[in-house]
Image: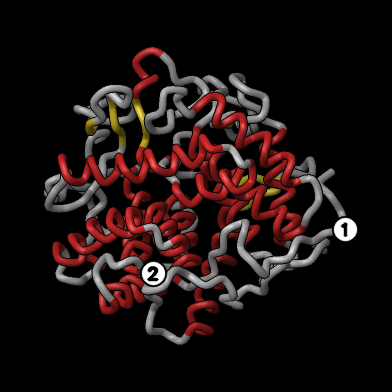
Amino acid sequence: MSGGRAGVPFGGHSFPYAPGTLRPSVDPAAADRRVLEHYRLWKGHFVRPRGDGSCAVYAPDAAYPYVAEAQGYGMVISALMAGADPDARDVFDGLLRYVLAHPSAGHPDLHAAQQDEAGRDVGGANSATDGDLDIAYALLLADRRWGGGYRARAVRRIDAIRETALPAAGGPIKLGDWSSGHFDEVSRTSDWMPAHFRAFRAATGDPRWGEALDTHLSLAGDLQQVYAPDTGLLPDFVVDTGSDPKPAPGQVLESEHDGDHHWNACRVPWRIGTDAAVSGDARARAVAGRMGRWMCAATHGDPGRIRCGYRLDGAAYGEGAAGAFVAPFAVAAMAGGGGQEWLDALWEWMAASPPVPGRYYSASVQLQAMLVVSHNWWPPSAPGVESGGVGRGFP
């Protein structure tokens, strides 16, 4: 049903991770089968046709049923799973149609962050940086997979993110195209995606993305040293980004836990750990390794003891383990964040925790972490990943 060629077969493990990057002790083929099982469940639970040739990732546990981060996750996942799912390109194109049908009110090349059950834009109809970062990255993956018109769309979105979310004077990325006034100096740490910034620099040649890469990795390390020297944990939100970056002092955007390692920052070990595994950057390895080693020690090597929320000093306040908090530490473990035994325990926990219908967020984060940990992740510039060249383009 899906046209074009999948450049690498799923399970090919053809992209070499950085030297020293660990992998689970389990048989690689068995790990691939478990990832595929989780993907099929994730797709069945959350990818919904919209009746107009589009589809969207349904997020029952988000503020609204359709949110930008979900569509970005879906596009990245479907591009990476194309070697295993013959319908993956149809899913990708359906998600892209949905995204293009909901442009941000702040910039036509960005995505409106929230829609209700009927597909109506709600909550201001502006962008959310994390969603557009993943959408742009996924378009680069699609260009590498299938060719067609994806690259031009990716570059337009990358340029729009740079224009609206990268501060001209430097500093970490903004929350969206709506950030101004008080929010002009607030950044969400889960938007710090160094592997994406590398891909954007390679795709556009724009040095601003290289500067962003350096800014975010340096700031992550600085925040760890000053505010979490024992744990390495980062907060959901950072304030005063233009002068004296620091964890949010209580509620800034979402909750009283905006300055804690909460339901946004739980993604940081995955995001920075992925860059460490793929690029081998010593800064990314240090950031991911520091928080991973602390979590291994704090839980005595038992992933089931990871809580859903921590103060930066390590005091736990959240409920029991969830995929969104556990799985990212498996990616950090690959880069020196706890060692082989800890990585194996985290993999076993993930393998025994399949997606469930009501928890899109944990399922989506965990599935992407499993793709990285099983060595099925590859960047858009990966050698040996063919473009589809000829064949259909996106209509």
Q: In the figure, 325 relative to 204: above or below? A: below
Residue topped by disc 1: 391
Which x, y percent locates residue 381?
62, 58
Structural distance between the alpha carbons of marks 2 and 1: 37 Å
Q: Amino acid at mark 2?
A: Met
**Front residue (pair 217, 323):** 217
Q: Quadrant of residue 190?
A: top left
- Packing grade of label 2 (10 A; few <14, some 14-19, many >=20) is many
**Residue that extends furthest to the bottom in the rendered view of this protein:** 27
Q: Secondary structure at mark 2?
A: helix
| Quadrant, the C terminus | top right
Q: Residue at x 42, y 23 (%)?
A: 169
Residue topped by disc 2: 350
Q: Residue at x 81, y 62 (%)?
A: 4
Q: Residue at x 38, y 33 (%)?
A: 172
Q: Would residue 227 appear left or right of 118 to someone viewing this image?
A: left
- Packing grade of label 1 (10 A; few <14, some 14-19, many >=20) is few
Which x, y percent locates residue 38?
52, 68
Q: Give the mark count.
A: 2
Q: Residue at x 35, y 49 (%)?
A: 268
Q: In the figure, 327 relative to 190: above or below? A: below
**Residue that extends furthest to the top in the rendered view of this protein:** 181
Q: Would residue 221 appear left or right of 384 to someone viewing this image?
A: left
Q: Amino acid at mark 1?
A: Gly
Q: Quadrant of residue 104?
A: top right
**Front residue (pair 205, 132):** 205
